[in-house]
Amino acid sequence: MNSNDLSKVILFRKMIIKGFFDAGVFKAEDADHILEWAVGEDWKTLNPKEWPDRIGQKTGLLIQKEPVRKTIPCLVELYNRRLMIFTSNN
């Protein structure tokens, strides 16, 4: 990975952190669970450029044209709904 790619990844991660903070998710562990659910278990090793396709496949969200920080609150909402449905069925 060259320095330009690395700086893009760092910026991407900062936008993700801001998106989670704006959505009311303050614990890194909670954010990890949401990303694991939305992107896949390999989200930490996957190139962030592949995340939108993975998220779209998993959630149905079309996020290619949306900034990541605006997409994260949608992911949090979907994840919370999924949790509420899962816990109410058990």
Image: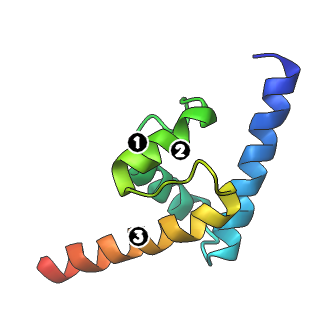
- View extreme (left): residue: 90
Question: Which residue is rendered at x = 68% and y = 65% of the image?
Answer: 19
Give the image quarter of residue 22: bottom right
Which quarter of the rendered picture does the C terminus lie within? bottom left
The three-letter amino acid code for the residue at tag 2 is Pro
Q: Is residue 88 above or below residue 37?
A: below
The answer to whether residue 39 is seen in the rendering is no
Q: Residue 16: x, y in percent?
A: 68, 55
Label at residue 52: 2
Q: Between marks 2 and 3, how big is the CA–CA gap?
A: 15 Å
- SS assignment at label 3: helix
Q: Count every numbered label the image shows and give the total.
A: 3
The residue wearing badge 1 is 40
* Residue closest to the eye, 6 or 26: 6
Nearer mark to the viewer, of 2 and 3:
2
Q: Between marks 2 and 1, how big is the CA–CA gap?
A: 12 Å
The residue wearing badge 3 is 78
| Neighbour tally class for label 1: few under 14, some 14-19, many 20 plus, Cα within 10 Å | some
Nearer mark to the viewer, of 1 and 3:
3
- SS assignment at label 2: helix
